[in-house]
Amino acid sequence: MHPDLYLTVHQQNERELGRQLELRRAAQDCPGCIVRARRHLAELVDRVRVRLTGAGAAAAPACCPA
C-alpha cells in the first residue's frame, strides 16, 4: 500500500473512532433519549415479527446517532 494512501486511511479511521467516542458520550449524557427508546422498541417489534411470521426485519431509518 502506498504510504500516502495508508496515512489517509489511518487518519480517516482515527476520525471515525473519535466521532464514535463523541456519540457514546452524548448518549450517556442523555439516558432518557426518546430516539433510543423508539429504536429499541422497533428492534423488539422486528424480533417479534420475525419470530411470528418468519419474515426479515424491516430497516428503520435512524434519525439520531445515539
Image (cartoon, rainbow, N blue to C red):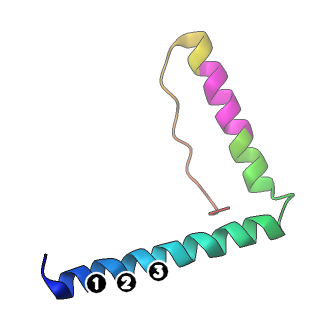
Could you say which is closer to the camera, residue 29 or residue 3?
Answer: 3
Residue 8 lies left or right of residue 46; in this view the side is left
Give the residue displayed 61% in from the left and 29% down from the top: 46
User: Is residue 23 located in the magenta-colored stretch of the structure?
Assistant: no
Marks 1 and 3 sit apart, C-alpha to C-alpha, by 11 Å
Three-letter amino acid code at disc 3?
A: Arg
Give the residue displayed 13% in from the left and 75% down from the top: 1
User: Is residue 42 located in the magenta-colored stretch of the structure?
Assistant: yes
The quarter of the rendered structure image containing the C terminus is: bottom right
Circles 1, 2 touching at the beta carbon (< 8 Å):
yes
Task: For mark 2, give the secondary structure.
Answer: helix
Residue 13 in which image quadrant: bottom left
Residue pointed to by mark 1 = 8
Residue pointed to by mark 3 = 15
Marks 1 and 2 sit apart, C-alpha to C-alpha, by 5 Å
Mark 2: few/some/many CA within 10 Å (<14, 14-19, 20+):
few
Highlighted range, magenta: 41-49
Q: Which mark is residue 57?
A: none
